[in-house]
Image (tube, helix red, strand yellow):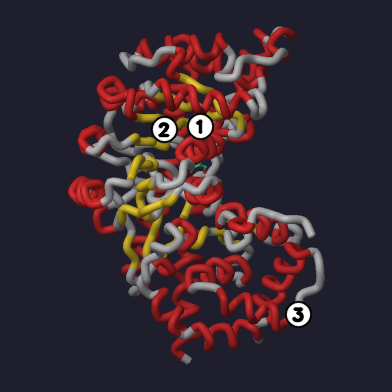
Amino acid sequence: MVKLLQKIKPMKKSPIREIIDAIAYIRKIKGIEIINCHAGVPGLLMKTDIAEKFKEIYRPEISDYTGTRGDILLLETLSEYFKSQEMNVEPKDILITLGGAQSGLFLFSEVMGTSGQILLTTNPTYPGLIGPSKIFNVEIKGLEILPEDNYQIDLKKLEKALEGDPTISAFAFTSPGNPDGAIQKNVEGILEIAKKYDIFVLVDATYAGLDFSEDLEKEIHPFTTYKKAWNNHKEMMALLYSLSKGLRNPGARLGLILSGNKEFMNHIEVIQSFSAICPSVSQNFFQIAFSNRGEILHESIKEHIEFVKERIFQMYYSLKELSEKMQIDIQLPEPQGAFYIFAKIENLETIGKNKRKIVDVLMKDNEFHKGLKGELEFRKKEKVSSEEVGEKLMEMGPNDLLCKYILYKEIVKPYRVTITPGTGFFIPGEIPDDAENYIRISCSKLKSREEAKIAAKVLLEGVKQLEKIASI
Ligand SMILES: Cc1ncc(COP(=O)(O)O)c(C=O)c1O
């Protein structure tokens, strides 16, 4: 018998990736339009003028290996870019990661992974941080953030958590946030507190620049939002960016870590020296984007903000208006940044309490049953019995049930809507009782405002229909 890492066995797959399989299945069914409200990647892809520029300067030499921290030309260009925005970043403070910001989270967890270290992070948080922490034995503790506070980190709660537990050695948060969509307003305050308790801080700024506030400076220099915090505290912090997402080229898979902490940088460099070298061709592409004070990058992000803003605010106002009309109790913080609305639907509580009844009805619903059975068979690559479908349904929380319901029942012809259940964004062992009332709605892939309106209608109608089944 092959001996495998036992701690992986009880771990669930990323809830975000799971839905991709369901989509792959449903795409095979003819006559269906999918409205994608689950994907966390830019819907508006790269501007073609960068590609054109790239063709102009392509040289065969850029097909060679580059250094472990990245191509020296890119490191220098990035340093120049940040300095031109008064952010004091030296080439030695930079490391380019292969595999987007996600591999930055792996590197971070790897160097934090000495036993006894505790990482504090917001609860909910991005599952891509929870997974690597588990793999590398970093114990995670949660700092609650709530929809009623617009998911802002409460500095008093942060201080209390650090004061009460001297084993916490680092604090990590996302801003713009995933799943919460929050822009943390007081990053400097967070760093001041961290300094007092000698805590290292990771700011995951994967969605840098996707900030809907009217602060012009942020829109013009999206990668330098944290420049004040950086210039004052760079030795006790790391900033994580996604080069690929930032330039609406998520498939290019490059990330960027900045830290003024020499030891941290040396540690991650050692690890990266034994893993794959970043592709030089993609690095060259980003070097072009960041040259001339990041002209192309800023233009690209400005355009992206407008694209996402239009869709996410349409979703927000449609949900707000319809939920009032339909008497659905939903907590819906106003969009601040990234692509996401992390909503709490109180009505899901009743649906959860009547799950047995709902499952019995759905098992007899041909359209729904056929859809879910087909998906399970597609995933397992073998026949699945009706009993298994029933068991799977009984394992689901009400938010999972809702996601499947709006995927397999045709509520507005010919549309199906994909959203992500919220439970997987909470830290295992610290999952609150109401976690199954949360859903994440992503607005990056909506084709139009019209699609946002339809998706909001389908979603809330889905809640009403499940509620009706529960009340029969
Ligand atoms: C908060 C956060 N960090 C990191 C990542 C990984 O991004 P990348 O595509 O650059 O690997 C994501 C992706 O969804 C994310 O939401």
Query: How far is mark 3 from mark 1, CA to CA?
Result: 42 Å
Question: In this rendering, is residue 50 above or below 39?
Answer: above
Query: How far is mark 1 from mark 2, CA to CA?
Result: 8 Å
Q: Secondary structure at mark 3?
A: loop
Query: Measured from the top left, where is residue 120 in percent x and y?
Result: 35, 47
Which amino acid type is marked by label 3? Ser
Q: Earlier in the sequence, mark 2 or mark 3?
A: 2
Which amino acid type is marked by label 1? Ser
Query: How far is mark 2 from mark 3, CA to CA?
Result: 46 Å
Q: Is mark 3 within 8 Å of ligand 1?
A: no
Q: Secondary structure at mark 1?
A: strand
Compare residues 414 and 42 and report the one nearer the observer. 42
User: What label sits on residue 385 in the rendered view?
Assistant: 3
Q: Residue furthest bottom?
A: 472
Query: Measured from the top left, where is residue 351 in percent x and y?
Result: 45, 79
Query: Measured from the top left, where is residue 391 in percent x and y?
Result: 63, 80
- Name the residue tied to disc 1: 242
Question: In this rendering, is residue 292 above or below 420?
Answer: above
Compare residues 462 and 342 and report the one nearer the observer. 342
At 70% from the left edge and 83% from the top edge, which residue is drawn?
387
Which amino acid type is marked by label 2? Ala
Q: Quadrant of residue 370?
A: bottom right
Q: Quadrant of residue 338?
A: top left
Compare residues 108 and 370 and report the one nearer the observer. 108
Question: In this rendering, is residue 392 above or below 80?
Answer: below
- Name the residue tied to disc 2: 208
At 33% from the left edge and 24% from the top edge, which residue is drawn?
235
Question: In this rendering, is residue 268 above or below 320?
Answer: above
Q: Is residue 414 left or right of residue 74?
A: right
At 35% from the left edge and 72% from the top edge, which residue is drawn?
346
Q: Is mark 1 within 8 Å of ligand 1?
A: yes
